[in-house]
Image (tube, rainbow, N blue to C red):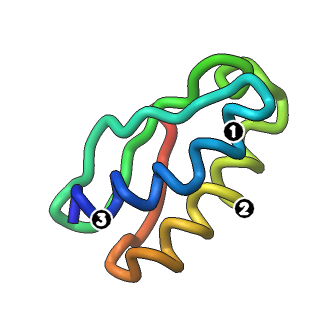
Amino acid sequence: MKEKVTKALETIRPHLQADGGDVELVEVTADGCVKVRLKGACGCCPMSQMTLKLGIEKKLKEMVPQIKSVESV
């Protein structure tokens, strides 16, 4: 599943980089929780949680249905 998540993040990454941010995969747990680290402009943006839930999590769940949640660490 980690490989699928990595590929999915590669499709999301250009959108974040366009605004000066990025996302780093930290861990994919056995129960389907994806842990990521928001970097650059995304790391300190007040809208980062919205980006995480409505952008990254939504897209990852579409591309990898086994994912239960996405958390920022």
Residue that badge 1 annotates: 16
Image quarter hosting the C terminus: top left
Q: Are marks 2 and 3 in contact (CB under 8 Å)?
A: no
Quick one: label 3, few (<14), some, or many (20+) residues within 10 Å? few
Residue that badge 2 annotates: 54
Q: Is residue 66 above or below residue 32?
A: below
Residue 49 at x, y = what percent? Answer: 71, 43
Quick one: label 1, few (<14), some, or many (20+) residues within 10 Å? some
Secondary structure type for disc 3: helix
Quick one: label 2, few (<14), some, or many (20+) residues within 10 Å? few
Q: Are marks 1 and 2 in contact (CB under 8 Å)?
A: no
Residue 50 at x, y = what percent? Answer: 77, 49
Residue that badge 3 annotates: 4
Q: Residue at x 22, y 67 (%)?
A: 31
Q: Earlier in the sequence, mark 2 or mark 3?
A: 3
Q: Give the CA separation, mark 2 to mark 3.
A: 19 Å
Front position in the image: 65 or 49: 65
Q: Is residue 71 left or right of residue 17?
A: left
Secondary structure type for disc 2: helix
Image quarter hosting the N terminus: bottom left
Q: Quadrant of residue 29?
A: bottom left
Q: Quadrant of residue 68?
A: bottom left
The amino acid beneath tag 1 is Leu
The amino acid beneath tag 3 is Lys
Q: Is residue 7 above or below residue 38?
A: below
Q: Are marks 1 and 3 in contact (CB under 8 Å)?
A: no
Q: Residue at x 43, y 33 (%)?
A: 24
The amino acid beneath tag 2 is Leu
Q: Residue at x 59, y 30 (%)?
A: 22
Secondary structure type for disc 1: helix
